[in-house]
Amino acid sequence: MYNMQRAEGKRKMTSELDELNEKALQAEHRSRRGQVSTEYLILLTVSLTLTIILAAIAYQSTYNTQEEHNAYVSRTFLDTVYKQGLNVYMQGGRARTTFTVELPYNINGSFIFYNSSSNELAINTSSAVLVETFDYPFNGTALEQLSHGGYAEIQLQNINGVVTAVIP
């Protein structure tokens, strides 16, 4: 009888141990699921942060490139007007020329200014004011009408020794 009680006690202990082991395994499984969820959230947060940082850098780079392009187009405009005007002035008489120039986009309002007292033509971009000083008689008042980006046709003509800009 003693052996039977002992055997039954062993079985009872074994079943209690099995039950405890099962509970421990379930708790460990829940813990692993929680750990996996936490790791996933951490990885998601890091990847989103990196994506936002890279998007901000790309946006800033694009903005800088647009500013550089506008400055380049503006400088080219001033150089072209100056050189074409110098050619007309050097030819003398009633010389004239018509040419097409590119003006920068994304500039609001009036951005070309002609100062007759200093004989300067200026373009106001969002990042700088570019100025061209003419060393020959020049009248660029008509160029102030150009207030949009894109291509524009300009005519320069020598009238009584003064190179005058006309928008045809």
Image: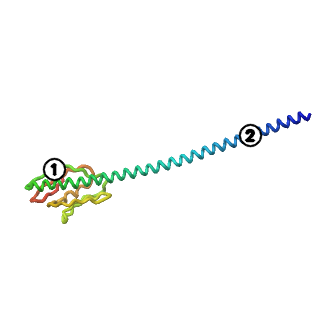
Residue at image coords 15%, 57% = 164
Q: Residue 78: x and y, percent?
A: 22, 55
Residue at the limit of the structure toward the bottom, as seen here: 117
Q: Camera-side residue: 156 or 3?
A: 3
Comparing 1 with 94, the one in front is: 1
What color scheme is it?
rainbow
Side of 151 relative to 33 (left or right): left
Describe the element under mark 2 as helix, strand or loop: helix
Against 147, residue 36 (above or below) is above
In front: 121, or 132? 132
* Number of numbered callouts drawn: 2
State the mark number for residue 21. Answer: 2
Measuring 44% from the left and 49% from the top, which residue is drawn there? Answer: 54
Q: Amino acid at mark 2?
A: Asn
Tell me which numbered mark, 1 or 2, is placed earlier along the sequence: 2
Residue 98: mark in rendering: 1
6 vs 139, left or right, is right
Relative horizontal placement of residue 105, taking residue 157 as reference (left or right): right
Coordinates of residue 73 in the picture (x, y in percent): 27, 52
At 16% across and 55% down in the image, what residue appears? 85
Where in the figure is residue 123, as x and y percent of width and height?
Answer: 26, 58
Q: Position of residue 47 (x, y in %)?
A: 51, 47
Image quadrant holding the N terminus, namely top right
